[in-house]
Image: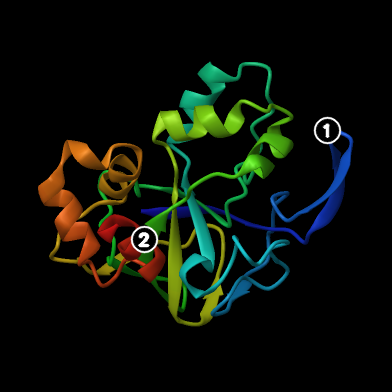
Amino acid sequence: MKLISVNVGLPREVDWKGKTVNTGIFKAPVSDRVMVRSLNLDGDRQADLTVHGGADKAVYVYPFEHYDYWRGELPNAELILGIFGENFTTTGLREDEVNIGDCFHVGTVKLMVTQPRMPCYKLGIRFGRPDMVKRFLASRRTGFYFRVLQEGEVGTGDTLELVSRDNNNITVADITQLYVNAEENPELLHRAAQLEALPKSWRDYFQR
């Protein structure tokens, strides 16, 4: 499990469908080691804090393994590292293999998996495609978020070490599937609604 790119970016204004939109989705790789703090990385910010950011979305992770899939889906797109808005581009951390509540060490940072990424229209802005949000969710290649349990530094090439595995065994992919079709698995839905490592907003949604 490897960190192959650390990506940061500050919000910028862009034109989208005749309107000016402020977005932090434009990330770029950095070569120096970066401080990871409880709400974001140094040099990185979210634009709309009502739906982005916060302790449960401090670090967004996207598996590099998915880039091959998107090269097939979007042959004309230049898929630079960080294009999905991720802070960490990784190998060895797929959504169907990582549990909500799993804890990792990387560099001097300790992190916990909290939730999948649910895309908003700004992903469409980044790719210049209004259909990108729908395609992203349909692919189930969502990536996921980390909560920062211990602040510290990370850098490209660092190894991610699994510190503890959540014994509820509910994966990131399970949560995405429940979001898309909760009626398919009522037993899993009940378990997810009780999952303490899952943010309260998700648990409340599943309770309803």
Residue at the far front: name it: 208
Q: Residues within 10 Å of mark 1 (few under 14, many from 20)?
A: few
Picture coordinates of residue 48 (x, y %)? 70, 62
> Can residue 200 be seen?
yes
Res 202 label: 2
> Can residue 160 be seen?
no
Q: Which residue is mark 1?
A: 17
Label 1 element class: loop
Judged left or right of residue 72, residue 78 is right
Residue plotted at (73% across, 69% down): 43
Q: CA distance from mark 2 to mark 1?
A: 31 Å
Picture coordinates of residue 171 (x, y %)? 25, 51
Judged left or right of residue 143, residue 167 is left
Residue plotted at (60% across, 71% down): 40
Picture coordinates of residue 104 (x, y %)? 34, 68
Label 2 element class: helix
Residue at the far left: name it: 187
Res 108 label: none
Q: Residues within 10 Å of mark 2 (few under 14, many from 20)?
A: some
Question: Eyeballing the image, is 40 above or below 141?
Answer: below
Residue sitting nearer the eye, 42 or 10: 10
